[in-house]
Image: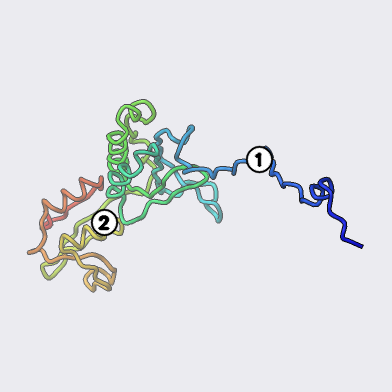
Amino acid sequence: MAPRKASASSSSSSTPPKKTFDLSKLKSPIKKAGSPLKGGNNDKPHFSIFRPIFQEGEQAGEESGNRMVRWRSRYHLKDAADAAIHPLILNEKPQWKKELKVFQAKIYSVVQARTILNALRDVEGEAGAIHLPQDVGDEEFETAKPAHLDVIPLLGDKLMLQGLTYPLLFHLKNLGFTYERGIEEANGVDAFTIAQAHFDAASMTGLLNQWGWTYELYDDAA
C-alpha cells in the first residue's frame, strides 16, 4: 500500500506550540539598603557627650568618670568630617556605633570637646548651625577624671611627669620625653622623664593648653 500523505491539519498539529514567557510575573529585585548615614533623619549632623556607667561590680550604676564624644556628619560630608575630626582624637581610632548611627571616641577635656564640635560645625556650615549645639558646657566635665599633669624636678638634672600621660603618648615623645621604669629617686614609679637641658617649657605648656590639660610646673621646671 502506498504511504498516506499527511494532511495539512495533521502537519500543523505536530508542530510544538510556542512557549511564551509571561513578563508580568517578573518582580524587580529588592534594592539593598544604602549607607546608614544616607537619607532620613540619619543624614542630619549630630554631636553629643556621653557619660559611661559602670555595668557591674560594686560601682554598678555609677559614672565611670570617662567621657565619650559622639558625632555624625551628613553623608556627603563624611570624608571632610573624618579629615577634620580624626586628628582631634587622641591615641585612639573612632568607632562606628551601628545601633546609634554615630561615631564615638574617648575624650579628656572640655577644650578637646569644643574643638571637635567647632570642626564639625565648620564642615557642616548652615546645617551645623541648625542641628548642632553652639557650645559644650563646662558642667559636662565637672565629674570627669581630671586631665592633669605635674612636671616635677628630680635629682640628676631630670624632670618627671605625673598624671594623665597616656593619651599624649606620641606628643610627649615628640617633645623628647622617654618612658622610664623604676625611677629610684621617685620610690620606684614608672614615668615619662626628660633632661632639664632638653625641656622646652613653652612647647610643653602649649601642648597641654591645646588639649585642655591642667598642669603644675614645680620649682626648676618652670
Which residue shows up at 76% across the image and 47% down it? Answer: 17
Is 213 left, or right, of 46 in this rendering? left
State how far apart marks 2 and 1 are (Cα): 65 Å
The residue identified by callout 2 is 168
Which residue matches tag 1?
Answer: 23
Instruction: Quadrant for residue 139, please give it.
Output: top left
Snapshot quadrant of residue 149: bottom left
| Residue furthest out toward the left | 197
Q: Residues within 10 Å of mark 2 (few under 14, many from 20)?
A: some
Residue occupying the point 21% across, 46% down:
210
Q: Residue at x 83, y 53 (%)?
A: 6
Q: Is residue 81 left or right of residue 201?
A: right
- In this view, the mark in front (2 or 1): 1
Amino acid beneath label 2 = Leu
> In screen coordinates, is 183 left or right of 96?
left
Residue type (three-letter) at the residue carrying disc 1: Leu
Q: Is residue 47 above or below residue 176?
A: above
